[in-house]
Image (tube, grey):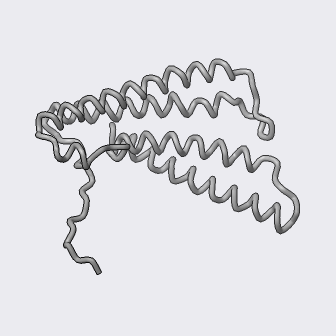
Amino acid sequence: MDRVLVTLETYAVGVLLIAVCDVVLLQVLMRYLFAWPNPWSEEVSRFCFIWLSLLGTSLAVARRTHFRFDQVTGRLPPRARKAVETFAAAVVLLFAFVLIGTGIALMDLTMGERSAALNLPVALVYAAAPVSGVLMAIHMLAGGAGEAEGMSAPPAPQQPASTGDVG
């Protein structure tokens, strides 16, 4: 199930990235070539970028490429490294739950508001936070379950070995 979610998120992030680029390019062309800016393009690009950022965060958690201190943890003894990684996973999971809670609260507060140009519910923008939080929690729990069953999490990115050549 986790792989299916990662695949769907990857496609969604790709589509959102293309949408942001296309809409911003359209806005620039309309503004500077035709002197007629689109009233809706700024909102579309902003809304897509918010969703893109939060879904991208979820993908980073799924691929274990989120913020890490590999240079520090790589030098720790195996037992200490495991403790630090477990603590970091707990912090990421806590952050996911905070995203879920605050995102739902923000959606509730903005349920009646509409965006200026598109007339969309503002709660749709804030829905990105709980959706991303749920996906992050699923990825963290699926990764933890995989490690508990003997499957390892994806390996940490390795730094290329230095050859010592200067130039």
Q: Which of the 4 quarters of the picture holds residue 121?
A: top right
Q: Residue furthest bottom?
A: 167
Q: Is residue 1 left or right of residue 150?
A: right
Quarter of the image with the C terminus is: bottom left
The picture places residue 140, in percent across and down from the top left corner, at: 32, 33
Query: Does residue 32 lie above or below 17 as drawn?
Result: below
- Who's the residue at 82% across and 61% down the image? 31
The front one of 121 and 8 is: 121
Q: Is residue 100 left or right of residue 66?
A: right
Q: Is residue 121 left or right of residue 93?
A: right
Quarter of the image with the N terminus is: top left
Query: Does residue 3 lie above or below 164 as drawn?
Result: above
The picture places residue 122, in percent across and down from the top left corner, at: 69, 30
- Who's the residue at 63% across and 18% down the image? 108
The picture places residue 119, in percent across and down from the top left corner, at: 78, 35
The picture places residue 59, in percent across and down from the top left corner, at: 41, 44
